[in-house]
């Protein structure tokens, strides 16, 4: 491999590595942010339930599938609707 081509390969490898590092850092930040917001949601659930004088059991919002794993529908995945 000639020097110019090797130099180009090195630049691309460096860029790919930088993108890899950036993605890992963003994932770590997103995890911390998710934990923060889930803790906030749990606190508001406690406040809400305290207003009901404990008539409902306190369940962790972290265990609710709909919160942690929202279902994303696309137009193609939805059943067809009758036109009005």
Image: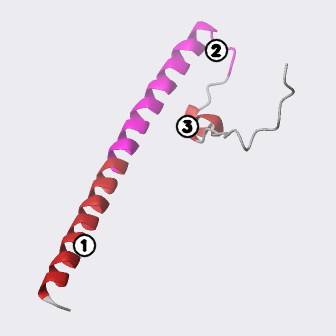
| Residue 71 locus on image (x, y percent) | 65, 40
Residue at 42%, 38% in the rendered image: 35
Q: Earlier in the sequence, mark 2 or mark 1?
A: 1
| Residue 29 locus on image (x, y percent) | 32, 44
Q: CA distance from mark 3 to mark 2?
A: 19 Å
* Image-based side of 58 in relation to 81, left or right: left
- 51 and 40: which is toward the camera: 40
Q: Quadrant of the C terminus?
A: top right
Residue 49 falls within the magenta-colored stretch: yes
Q: Are marks 2 and 1 in contact (CB under 8 Å)?
A: no
The 10 Å Cα crowd at callout 1, few under 14, some 14 to 19, many 20 or more, is few
Residue to which mark 1 is pinned: 13
Residue to which mark 2 is pinned: 54
The 10 Å Cα crowd at callout 2, few under 14, some 14 to 19, many 20 or more, is few
Residue at 29%, 52% in the rendered image: 25
The quarter of the picture where residue 14 lies is bottom left
* Image-based side of 75 in relation to 47, left or right: right
Residue at 20%, 92% in the rendered image: 1
Q: Earlier in the sequence, mark 3 or mark 1?
A: 1
Residue to which mark 3 is pinned: 62
Q: CA distance from mark 3 to mark 1?
A: 39 Å
């Amino acid at each position: 491999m000639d020097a110019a081509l090797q130099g180009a390969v090195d630049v691309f490898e460096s860029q790919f590595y930088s993108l890899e590092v950036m993605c890992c850092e963003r994932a770590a930040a997103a995890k911390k942010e998710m934990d923060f917001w889930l803790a906030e949601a749990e606190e508001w659930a406690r406040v809400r339930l305290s207003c009901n004088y404990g008539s409902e059991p306190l369940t962790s919002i972290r265990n609710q599938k709909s919160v942690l794993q929202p279902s994303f529908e696309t137009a193609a995945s939805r059943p067809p609707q009758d036109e009005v």
